[in-house]
Structures are given as C-alpha cells and as structure tokens.
Amino acid sequence: MPASPLLALTHFMTLAILLVPLVISMLTTKVWIIEKTKTSVKTAFFTSTLSFLLFKLSPPLSVVMDYSLLSASTFHLKLNLKFDLYSMLFTPTALYISWCILEFSQWYMDKDPYPSKFTKYLLTFIMAMMILVSANSPLLFFIGWEGVGILSFFLIAWWQNRPNTNTSALQAIIYNRMGDIGLISCLAWLTTRLNTLALQKIFTCDDFITLLPLLGLILAAMGKSAQFGLHPWLPAAVEGPTPISALLHSSTMVVAGIFLLIHMHPLLTLNKYALSACLLLGAITSLVAAFYALTQNDIKKIIAFSTSSHLGFMMVTVGLDQPQLAFLHLSLHAFFKAMLFLCSGSIIHNLNNEQDIRKMGGLHKCLPITSACLTIGSMALAGTPFLTGFYSKDIIIETMTTSHLNAFALLITLIATSFTVVYSLRITMFVQTGQPQHMSMLLLDEYNPLVINPIIRLAAGSIAAGLIISMNITPLETLPMTMPMYIKTVTLVVVALSLLMALKLAAMTNKMPPKSSHTHNFSNSLMYFNTMIHRSTPMITSTISEKYSTRMMDSTWQEKMGPKKLAESQVLPTKTTSSLQKGLIKIYLTSFILSILLLTYLFY
C-alpha cells in the first residue's frame, strides 16, 4: 500500500480511537469511563507514533487531502487536511502528554461529582487541538481554534462555586475574543481579496498580501498565546483544576497562537515589519512574564508565568524567521511544563490545597519522587545542558546572537533567560529545602501509581525528548555552523551567572528588612497592569457612559424637548401679551368708543 493513503488512514484511526469513549459516554455515565478514556488516548498515542514513523519513511515532505464541501461559480469550499512534519510530530507529543494527564486526573479528580463530564470535555479539547494542527484551510483551522477556546472556558470554570474561577474563565474567553477579531478580520480579507481559503493558493498570491492581514494574524496569536497586552488571562487560568492547567499550558490552547504563525509563516517571511513586530512582542513578553514570576508566591502562578515567558521565546523565534526552531521549542516545552504542573498538583493535593510556596519546605524527604521530578523540570526549564529545554533554548539564543537584529530584543531576551534560572531555583529552594512550614499532622503520601507513573513518564520525556525530537526535525534553512566561542557559550554563561546570582539572593533573603522594596511590589502586583486594565478601563467607561447616557439623555428629554422645554416655549408669548396689557381702562374705553364712532361714520 502506498505511504500516503496509509498515512491518512492511520491518522483517521487515531481520531476514531479518540471518538470511541465519547460515543460510549453518551450511553453510560459510569465512573469507569475515565479508565477507558485513558486507554483510548494511550492507544491513539501509539497509533499516531506509527503515523509519524510512516511519515519519516515516506518520500513526500507533506501529504494533502481535499474533500469538497461546497462549490459555487466563483468560490469553492474544501475540507483540507495536511500531514506534514508539524502535525505528524505534534500529534504524538500532545497525545503522550494527554495520556499522562488523564491518568493523573483519575487520582486528582477522584472526589469530583462529575468525572464522566470532565473526561468528555478533556477528550473533546484534545480532538479540537488535533483538528487545529492538521488543518490545511483557514476555515478548518478556525473550527479547531474556536473549539479549544470554548472548551478552555468550560474547563477553567469547572469549579463554578469559586468566584475567582468564574472570573478567570471570563478573562480567558474575553481576551481570546479580542484576539479572534484579528483572525476573523484576516480570514475576511483573504476571502474578499483572493477569493479562496486554500493555503496553497494563498501562499502563491504573496504579492497581494499586505501588512494588514498579517497584523490580524499577530493579534490572534497575541490573544491565544498570551503575549504582552493580552496576557493576564493565562496566570488567571490556573484557578481551574491542575490537570486542566497542565494540558492548557503545555500542548493545547496556549501553543495554538504560535502554531498559527508557524502555519502561516510563508506569508510572514515576506514582510519584515511583521517579523519585527513578532520579534519585539516576543522579547517584551518573555521579559515581563519572567519579571512577574520572580516575586509570586503561588506555585501554579509561577509556572504559569514561566509558560508566558517561554511563549515569548517562541514568538521571538518566529520573528527570527525560524519557524522550525519555534516548533522545536513548542514541542519540547510541553514535556517539562506538563510535569511541573503535575508535580505542583501532587504537592497541593497532599498539603490540603495549599499553593503558597512559603508554607511548604522540606518536601524532598516526604515526597521524594515528586521533588526529584520537580527538580528535573526546573532544570529543564532553566536550560540546563542536555536536558530537554537546552536543545531548543541554546540554539534559539545562538541564532539570535548570529542574526541581524536590534540589540534591544537580544538584550531583554537574555535578561529573561537569566530570570528563568532565578525563579526556577526559587521554586526548588522554597518547596523542597529547609524546614517544613506546613501543618505537622498532614499525612503526605505519593505512593499511588496514578500519581507517580505519569510524572515519571513526563520526567523521562523531559530528559530524553529533546534529543529524540531535535534529531527528527530538519531545518529548512541552514543554521550557523561556525561562531566565536563567546557566542557559542553565551547560553551556558547566562545560566551559570544567573544561578550564582539566585544563590546569592537566596542567602540574602534572611538578612533583608521586613519591609519590601518598591521593585518587589512592582513585580508582585504585576506592574499594576491588571489594576489599570481591569479596574481603570471599566471605571472610565462607566463614567463616560453615566455622563453621556444619564446626564445628556436627561438634559435632552427633560430640558430640551420635554416639559421644561414646553414651559420655556410659553415664556415669550406670555411676555408679549403681558406687555400689551397695561391695565389702563379709561384709555381702552376711550379708544374703543372712538373706534366705534369712526366705523359708524365711515359705513353709514
């Protein structure tokens, strides 16, 4: 059988395997459906891995499948699927992480009253992401895009009795709606100007593409991938269950915006202004998010801000005109980020829902496997050599230092890299070292296979996935082969210096005065961004609305057109008639008699 049809067949088998639990869940509401879902995702992972092996052995670089949905005289609508390196490699990565998260969910959501509903949402979320990565037409991509958006709202708001959870879900959907304006505008522009939604035809019409639709794509990526300006929803999304945070921040929704830019990169590469916008936006995002993470005390929020910072790294790589490197970092980042969230979920669950790292400490003895995996994840996050994060981070910084770009973007990206080491070490020291700060009567237990097995599998991915995936990605452009020693070692130098600085800061912690500095408050309060946007904007809008709706409407209807205006309109006639009536009765009688006599004389 030829490789191309077999490749499509295995991909459709993967989707069909994922559909089985959804069909069964419509017929039953038993709790065992979670176990069946985990088995289904596990089987789909092995099937997608077979698809990737077939893709590597087949000669074409990509396989495109078209299904005609609607044909008109001037417009053709097709269901296009594209099986290329991006979709073939990302699908097993996402399914591997989803398998681990679903297994962890069996333990974490054990007491939840609606496990079947939770599993269905989670599975539909994964399928929407698979549709998104394999779509070859903007219309099908938009279906997957909206699917992950609306399901993220349902999953973040899972615990609806918590006020913060509902607020976080609303933030996620509102900020994503703002980004969707850009994607819808771009699709409308392409449809009206190019009369097609097939990506191959769009890429051949590159002479007609202006900056406007590209800015729409960047706005869409800003919303979905939480770039600076539309970033507050991402740290707020950790109010949902920890398995949702792990899936959301690693391999599904937040990478959809970066995946959009990678998918549409043939258009971006033609416009230097769009690439510069991506470069600067990503650099600012990586620095600001890392600066936020330095002083946070909620362990999940620290990991969430690190996600936003690494999304900035991916955006920088897109701006460097290196989409393959962005995809490499996107794939590798998913392993250790999912593991960090699962480790934090295990710790939070054991400490009776305590998320403040200042109330932890000494957990390396009570939870040794979780602590070891948390250390591996933090080291991979910081870019420690030969762990997963190093293989992408090192080459991204090398590409930056050997590219023609502004020094501002390079400088703040290097500062963000150093901040990553600082907050990674801060998590490790506060959570694992020192004396226990939690309640002594808590019974800490991690020896449950549903907890340990997924974390260990993700730890193995955080160690080995970097080498495996980087060996299977062939860059479309030649990477720099020779460079000075100081450029080659810049990543190691930054990591080492940052580690020393972090250790020094940790040693100074006990000697600092109790009053926090202005810089600490500035970082801890998120640079007052949420205060300015979430409070000032509604207040200004409310003030303007009150002024123009209440005062102007009252002024118009009551004073300009209503009863007050009617009263004013009677003033002039009243004054006129009053001025004519002086009350001089003798004169009036005399003039009346004279008038009668005059008329009598004239007519008789």
Image: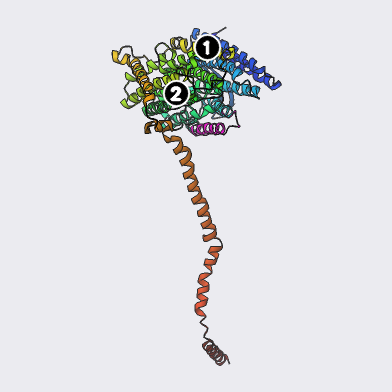
Question: In the structure shown, which secondary structural element does the residue marked by tag 2 occupy?
Answer: helix
From the image, which quarter does the N terminus lie in?
Answer: top right
What amino acid type is highlighted by mark number 2? Ser
Residue at horizontal 37 percent and vertical 21 percent from the top: 507
Q: Is residue 231 above or below residue 44?
A: below
**Residue occupied by mark 1:** 456
Percent position (x, y) of residue 368? 50, 12
Percent position (x, y) of residue 487? 31, 16
Callout 2 touching callout 1 (CB < 8 Å) = no
Percent position (x, y) of residue 239? 54, 28
What amino acid type is highlighted by mark number 1? Ile
For the rendered model, the colour scheme is: rainbow
**Residue occupied by mark 2:** 306
Judge left or right: residue 257 versus residue 406: right
Magenta stretch? 156-181
Residue at horizontal 46 percent and vertical 41 percent from the top: 536
Percent position (x, y) of residue 328? 44, 16
Between residues 387 and 135, which one lies in front from this camera angle? 387
Q: How many marks?
A: 2
Reply yes or no: does residue 563 show up in magenta.
no
